[in-house]
């Protein structure tokens, strides 16, 4: 089974100077739960409230040992973002419900 990697966004540093093509598809919390069933799940999100909600949905998730991630075509990549940004840049957002998150499956088509 493929490894599942949860990220907050796609950063240039993840590309390792490679050109890639990706598709980004919205998914539901239920789909994430299905995808993650029995898989190794590594979480690169550091926002505590978001992690708490994700942990309820996918309890076998573990925190990444380092903040660095390089995109691998073999990984199942899930991108998790807030549905609405904070009104002030840098302001802490209180995340209390999965409805406040948007989930995407990122598929690497070429690398």
Image (spheres, rainbow, N blue to C red):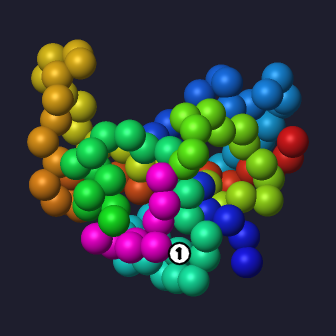
Residue at 13%, 55% (x, y): give it: 96
Q: Quadrant of residue 70?
A: top right
Q: Quadrant of residue 71?
A: top right
Total numbered labels placed on residues in the image: 1
Residue 104 seen in render = no
According to the picture, the residue beneath numbered tag 1 turns out to be: 36
Q: In the rendering, at what x and y percent does residue 59 appear?
A: 38, 73
Name the quarter where the N terminus is drawn: bottom right
Instruction: Classify mark 1: residues with Cα within 10 Å, few (<14), some (14-19) or many (20+).
Output: many
The residue furthest front is 65
Decide if residue 111 is on the left or right side of residue 15: right
Above-or-below relation of 74 to 36: above
Residue at 53%, 75% (x, y): give it: 36
Indicate whether residue 62 is drawn in magenta: yes
Above-or-below relation of 98 to 12: below
* Residues rendered magenta in the picture: 56-63
Name the quarter where the C terminus is drawn: top right
The residue furthest top is 89
Residue 61 seen in render = yes
Above-or-below relation of 59 to 99: below
Q: In the rendering, at what x and y percent does residue 13 appear?
A: 67, 24
- 26 or 88: nearer the eye? 88
Residue at 17%, 48% (x, y): give it: 95
Above-or-below relation of 57 to 93: below
Q: Quadrant of residue 58?
A: bottom left
């Amino acid at each position: 089974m493929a490894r599942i990697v949860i990220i907050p966004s796609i950063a240039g540093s993840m590309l390792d100077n490679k050109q890639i093509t990706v598709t980004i598809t919205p998914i539901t919390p239920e789909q994430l739960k299905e995808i993650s069933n029995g898989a190794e799940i590594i979480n690169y999100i550091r926002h505590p409230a978001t992690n708490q909600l994700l942990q309820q949905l996918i309890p076998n998730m573990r925190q990444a040992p380092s903040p660095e991630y390089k995109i691998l075509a073999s990984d199942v990549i899930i991108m998790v973002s807030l549905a609405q940004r904070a009104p002030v840049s840098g302001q802490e957002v209180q995340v209390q419900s999965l409805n406040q998150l948007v989930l995407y499956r990122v598929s690497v088509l070429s690398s």
